[in-house]
Structure formats: structure tokens, C-alpha cells
Image (cartoon, rainbow, N blue to C red):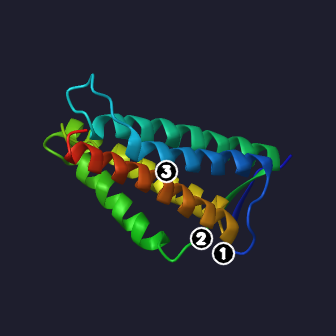
Amino acid sequence: MSKKLAVQNSTNPTTTTGSSFVRTCFHILFFVTPLLLWPYTTEVFEFNKMIFVYAMTTIIATGWIINSIKAGKFTLVRTPLDLPISLFFLSQIASTIFSIDPHTSLWGYYSRFHGGLMSTICYIILFYAFVTHFQKDTKAIFGIVKTLLATATITAFYGVLEHFGI
């Protein structure tokens, strides 16, 4: 079995079983992240969400890799954002290497955990996994929009209740 890197220009949607797993993980990521609060940490909001995003990125990337191994090729959809993302990523790597505080540059700082290189890597992986597994599949993208609207509705309802002290 030869190993190939298939780079696509957004032509055919990926609809394999592995893709279904990755798509389901995106639904979980988009639904759970805004609702995730853990009162037993000193930073109630962002820390818990970032740990969840790191975990879901690992699961999504693993599903993508396993799907690629089964298919015998790695598919990565090209986008017009490839160059800007690459340049931004290279600048993040350089700033982490030359930082006066490499730990903060890598992980972010307290109460702002998504500002480091690790979160940037996660966001880039999630972006490419999303465009690869949802490419030109309007029905699947509409499903993601419904998931986002559902979690936004729950979050807004919770916010209104909290505002009135209920």
C-alpha cells in the first residue's frame, strides 16, 4: 500500500465512515464547548473550554489520521487561506522561539489560555479538518449551523436566567 498525500481544491465531499466520526466530533465540539463550565477550578470559563478543545482536537486529528490510513492517502483540502495561515503560523513559531517567556508563548497565560502556540496549532488543525470533512456538503454544514444555534439558544437562556438570579 503506497502512501499518498492528496491535496484537493474543494471538489468532492468526504463521506466515509471515518468522516462521519470526525463530523460527529465537530458537532460535539461546537455544542459542548459554550456550555462547559466547571466550578471546581479557579478559572471557571476559559481553562475548561481550552482543555476540552485540546482533547477534541486530538480526537478529531486521530480520527482523520485513522481514516487516512484506511483510505491509503491523506486528504487535505486547499483553501485561499493557506498562505495567510502558513505565514501566521510561522510567525507564531518564531515568536515562541524568541519569546522572553516561552511557557506563556506556548500555552497562553492565566485567564487567557487560548493565546499560545498550542491553541493556534489546534485551531489550524480544526480548520483544515473541518474544510476537508465538510467540503461542499451543504446538508452537513447546515447541520453544524443547527448545532451552533441549539447551543447558542441554551447559552442565551442560561444567561437570561442567571441575569434574573434564577
Q: Amino acid at mark 3?
A: Phe
Q: Position of residue 106 (x, y in %)?
A: 28, 41
Give the labeled residue for mark 2.
78
Q: Amino acid at mark 2?
A: Arg
Task: Check residue 32 in the rendering and tell me which mark sits there, or answer none.
Answer: none
Q: Earlier in the sequence, mark 2 or mark 1?
A: 1
Q: Position of residue 111 (x, y in %)?
A: 19, 40
Q: Closer to the camera, 54 or 24?
A: 24
Query: Which quadrant holds the C terminus?
Result: top left
Calculate the distance from the C-alpha at mark 3 to the C-alpha at mark 2: 23 Å
Task: Check residue 30 in the rendering and tell me which mark sits there, or answer none.
Answer: 3
Q: Earlier in the sequence, mark 3 or mark 1?
A: 1
Looking at the rendered structure, the secondary structure element under dot 3 is helix
Q: Closer to the camera, 146 or 118?
A: 146
Q: Is residue 12 above or below residue 50?
A: below
Q: Closer to the camera, 80 or 5?
A: 80
Give the labeled residue for mark 1.
9
Disc 2 and disc 1 in contact, CB within 8 angstroms: yes
Q: Amino acid at mark 1?
A: Asn
Disc 3 and disc 1 in contact, CB within 8 angstroms: no
Q: Is residue 138 above or below residue 130?
A: below
For disc 2, the neighbor class at 10 Å (few under 14, some 14 to 19, many from 20) is: some
For disc 1, the neighbor class at 10 Å (few under 14, some 14 to 19, many from 20) is: few
